[in-house]
């Protein structure tokens, strides 16, 4: 007898076959390593829905880019590294460009693919996740943690907390409550550095994945008398945490989640326990963004939308998928300006990703003003922004409560460069001279 997960995976595969999946010689083929089932599936549904909706939108609205349409195929990973590698190897055979660009939307899968994509010359794009020292393109020419990284996000959250504490964090107690995984561990070094600089006490409390058991950890939070909790959760862990915080009486307006703990899929199931909760955001929610409204009109109006549940249109995760789509399409556009109107190879898209310039003016042209921060990349900077906003859940929707906040670049960048240098030493990598890149 099939399990529900197996049946759901089968349905996801069927849906991908029904989409414009067949790689044609004149299509820009994109391999999609999705997770729509498993403990993190509810987030994946919106993200991949938005990503596919944007590619469909470009195909319908513009006839593709430079006459080159997107095609894609989806492979279900259930957010598991081994399945992610299997899907990558399977899908790269579907196109002579090996998929040309990969968005795992998973830190563990990104780590597993880092050296494979380097060998295959396929850009690995990690929008707001993944291995953070890949910001340094001298040592990681094929990896792009676009928009912002976990350390920049974490230090931007510290800036926001400092603002709320009138600029003085001395003597304050901050608990870092995190999923015990590469994703959760990434910010610890940087938070420890912030604690030394700002004079606050940092307590780190891990939670075993998938995170549906947190009683003991929240007792620690209460016993430590934390002034603030920085919460690095994902999937079912998030609603569990909000309910646990309510149970021990911890105020949700002193609890700030990462962007992976800041979607409607996290707050709605928690009910009243989520009200007042704060989170970081690298993109806003809502249909008031002109691009999102036009996607609903053009794509869903023609019955070609990817989401079965249309109430998710304009949600945090759906809009995040649109952002991933924008980054992909703009890389193709930039690449065509240099290499011509044709299907681009991985090498050509790598160059384009290193020359992105999504300015506020360009975002306005796309109808995406305010949806995401401006992004400008280079050989030395594969991140391109480093900014977040803070949003708050009012019981029914997310409201933005800050401007774009830049992470502590002065603290973060030297540590990331040192980490990248160490990686290069271990792998015998000769760093590129970025002054010679053009």
Image (tube, rainbow, N blue to C red):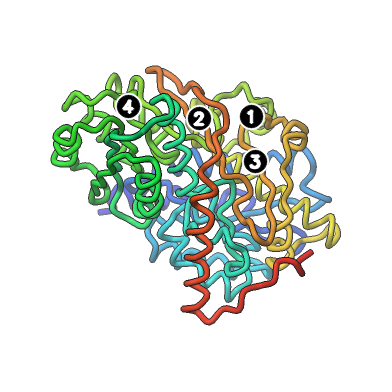
Left or right: 89 as drawn, with respect to 202: right
Question: How much space separates mark 3 and mark 2, taking CA atoms?
Answer: 14 Å
Count neighbours of disc 3 (C-alpha within 10 A) and say few if under 14, some if 14 to 19, many if 20 or more: many
Mark 4 vs mark 1: give the one in front: 4
Nearer to the camera, 103 or 133: 133
Determine the image quadrant of residue 246.
Answer: top left
The secondary structure type at the circle numbered 4 is helix
Circle 2 residue: 315
Left or right: 276 as drawn, with respect to 308: left
Please tell me which of labels 3 and 2 falls first in the chain.
3
Q: Position of residue 5 (x, y in %)?
A: 32, 49
Count neighbours of disc 2 (C-alpha within 10 A) and say few if under 14, some if 14 to 19, many if 20 or more: many
Circle 4 residue: 254
**Quadrant (top left, top right, bottom left, bottom right) of the C terminus:** bottom right
Question: How much space separates mark 4 and mark 1, taking CA atoms?
Answer: 25 Å
Q: Position of residue 2 (x, y in %)?
A: 29, 53
Question: How much space separates mark 3 and mark 1, taking CA atoms?
Answer: 17 Å
Q: Is residue 89 visible?
A: no
Mark 4 vs mark 2: give the one in front: 4
**Quadrant (top left, top right, bottom left, bottom right) of the N terminus:** bottom left
Count neighbours of disc 1 (C-alpha within 10 A) and say few if under 14, some if 14 to 19, many if 20 or more: some
């Amino acid at each position: 007898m099939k399990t529900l997960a197996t049946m759901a995976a089968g349905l996801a595969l069927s849906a991908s076959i029904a989409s414009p999946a067949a790689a044609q010689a004149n299509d820009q083929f994109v391999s999609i390593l999705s997770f729509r089932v498993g403990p993190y599936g509810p987030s994946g549904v919106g993200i991949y829905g938005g990503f596919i909706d944007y590619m469909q939108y470009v195909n319908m609205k513009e006839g593709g880019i430079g006459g080159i349409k997107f095609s894609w195929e989806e492979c279900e990973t259930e957010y598991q590294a081994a399945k992610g590698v299997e899907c990558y190897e399977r899908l790269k055979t579907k196109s002579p460009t090996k998929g040309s660009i990969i968005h795992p939307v998973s830190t563990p899968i990104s780590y597993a693919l880092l050296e494979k994509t380097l060998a295959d010359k396929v850009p690995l794009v990690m929008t707001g996740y993944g291995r953070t020292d890949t910001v340094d393109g001298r040592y990681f020419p094929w990896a792009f943690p676009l928009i912002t990284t976990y350390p920049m996000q974490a230090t931007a959250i510290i800036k926001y907390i400092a603002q709320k504490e009138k600029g003085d964090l001395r003597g304050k107690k901050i608990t870092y409550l995190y999923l015990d995984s590469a994703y959760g561990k990434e910010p610890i070094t940087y938070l420890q550095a912030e604690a030394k600089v700002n004079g606050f006490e940092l307590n780190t409390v891990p939670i075993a994945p998938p995170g549906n058991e947190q009683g003991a950890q929240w007792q620690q939070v209460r016993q430590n008398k934390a002034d603030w909790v920085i919460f690095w959760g994902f999937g079912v862990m998030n609603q569990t945490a909000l309910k646990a915080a309510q149970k021990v009486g911890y105020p949700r307006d002193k609890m700030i989640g990462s962007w992976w703990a800041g979607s409607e899929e996290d707050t709605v199931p928690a009910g009243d326990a989520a009200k007042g909760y704060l989170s970081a955001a690298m993109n806003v929610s809502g249909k008031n963004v002109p691009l999102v409204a036009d996607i609903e009109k053009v794509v869903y109006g023609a019955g070609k939308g990817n989401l079965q549940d249309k109430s998710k249109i304009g949600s945090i995760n759906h809009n995040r998928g649109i952002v991933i789509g924008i980054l992909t399409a703009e890389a193709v556009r930039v690449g065509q300006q240099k290499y011509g109107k044709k299907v681009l190879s991985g090498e050509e898209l790598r160059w384009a990703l290193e020359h992105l310039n999504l300015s506020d003016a360009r975002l306005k042209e796309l109808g995406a003003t305010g949806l995401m921060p401006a992004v400008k990349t280079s050989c030395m900077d594969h991140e391109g922004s480093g900014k977040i906003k803070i949003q708050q859940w009012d019981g029914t929707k997310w409201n933005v409560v800050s401007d774009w906040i830049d992470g502590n670049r002065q603290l973060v960048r030297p540590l990331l460069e040192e980490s990248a240098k160490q990686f290069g030493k271990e792998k015998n990598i000769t760093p590129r001279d970025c002054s010679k890149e053009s």
